[in-house]
Amino acid sequence: MSSVIRDFNGPPRQLMVGLCPRDGKATFLSRADAKRAARGMFPGQHHRPVRCGDRWHFERIRGGS
Ligand SMILES: [Zn+2]
């Protein structure tokens, strides 16, 4: 099993509302949108929504250490 990241086309445009001016991450209006986008982009991986100001990003949860 390789853990190569496959084609990264960015988050679905319908969900993404832009890039964060602070950290450059994909930004979403709501927690649910961030989760949904993460699932669409990285099926099978675990992500959690993280809040940034009044918008949301997601970050990957690493399994193991
Ligand atoms: Zn941010």
Image: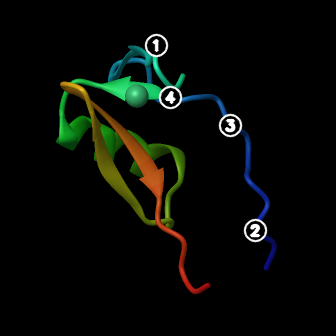
Q: Ligand 1 within 8 A of label 4's CB?
A: yes
Q: Nearer the viewer, residue 11 or 30?
A: 30
**Tag 1: residue type?**
Pro
Q: Is residue 13 left or right of residue 55?
A: right
Which residue sits at x=73%, y=40%? 7
Task: Say what amino acid the circle numbered 3 marks.
Answer: Phe
Tell me the residue at 46%/13% (across/down).
21
Residue 21 is labelled as: 1
Task: State left or right for residue 29 relative to residue 2.
Answer: left
Q: CA distance from mark 2 to mark 1?
A: 30 Å
What residue type is disc 2 on? Ser
Earlier-in-chain disc, 2 versus 4? 2
Alpha-carbon span between mark 2 and mark 4: 22 Å
Answer yes or no: disc 3 within 8 Å of ligand 1: no
Above or below for 25 versus 36: above
Mark 4 = which residue? 25
Q: Residues within 10 Å of mark 1 (few under 14, many from 20)?
A: few
Q: Please give the residue where the numbered disc 2 appears in the rendered image.
A: 3
Question: Residues under labels 3 and 4: Cα distance?
Answer: 14 Å
What is the CA distance from the residue labelled 1 to the residue labelled 4?
A: 8 Å
